[in-house]
Image (cartoon, rainbow, N blue to C red):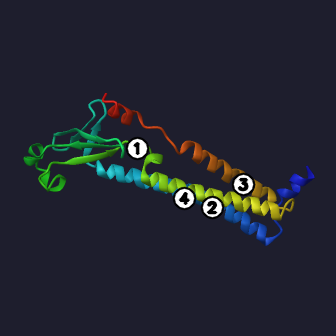
Amino acid sequence: MHVLDLMFRNPVDLEVWIVVVYVSGVVIGARLIEVLARMHLARARRSAEEGFEYLPDEDQYHCAGGERLALHSFEPSRKLAIYHASPGQCQSCHLKGTCAPDGTGRRIFRSLAAWAETDLGRFHQRISLLMFAAGTLLAVAGMWKWNGRPGTGYLLAGLLASASAMIWDLRTGHVSRSKKSRRITEGR
């Protein structure tokens, strides 16, 4: 028990403090980057569908002009559903100038990919994994160098937090296709 008391005392060496703070910053920063990226993607998706209401039972979008955009096509490789209103539907609409000014009819691109399946999600997951790996290695190196000194218990806690976050990301990063994606792919 004496060793644990010693390990979880506040560090005496400035170097141990620096490593503890750095490992904590890396672990927190990795999660913060991913959270901010998820928020950005959610905002971008909301912006793309602004003014349209998705009707899941009918698998259509309803626009403010009263028209419906039906599922036009599906790109399985990109997990992208494309909903389209014909030019005729949009031609007489009072919102045409701001909604579909080019005369081709409005299109909405709806991603069916889960966060981890998007390019943005994979990129940020890799960044997080690299940061967690760096935190893990730094904590291991610090524990190796200052083994048993005051503060090494905090490095052990950082090691456990960083390694468990890395394992969690690896296990949950490969999310299976969404139900919606499966339904469209299977033609139901």
Where is mark 2, residue-wise? 26
Q: Given the image, on which type of amino acid does mark 1 rest?
A: Ala
Per the rendering, the mark at residue 134 is none
First-in-chain label (2 vs 1): 2
First-in-chain label (3 vs 1): 1
Where is mark 3, residue-wise? 159
Residue 118 screen position, x and y as percent: 42, 49
Residue 127 screen position, x and y as percent: 54, 58
**Residue visible at 37% across and 34% down?**
180
Per the rendering, the mark at residue 113 is 1
Q: Are marks 2 and 1 in contact (CB under 8 Å)?
A: no
Element at badge 2? helix
Quarter of the image with the C terminus is top left
Quadrant assignment, res 182: top left
Q: Nearer the viewer, mark 4 or mark 2?
A: 4
First-in-chain label (3 vs 4): 4
Q: Given the image, on which type of amino acid does mark 4 rest?
A: Ile
Residue 113 screen position, x and y as percent: 40, 43
Element at badge 3? helix
**Residue visible at 71% across and 56% down?**
158
Q: Distance between the Cα atoms at labels 4 and 1?
A: 19 Å
Q: Distance between the Cα atoms at labels 2 and 1?
A: 28 Å
Q: Are marks 3 and 4 in contact (CB under 8 Å)?
A: no
Q: Distance between the Cα atoms at labels 3 and 1?
A: 32 Å
In the rendered view, would you say 10 is above or below 86? below
First-in-chain label (4 vs 1): 1
Neighbour tally class for label 4: few under 14, some 14-19, many 20 plus, Cα within 10 Å:
some
Q: Is residue 10 visible?
A: no
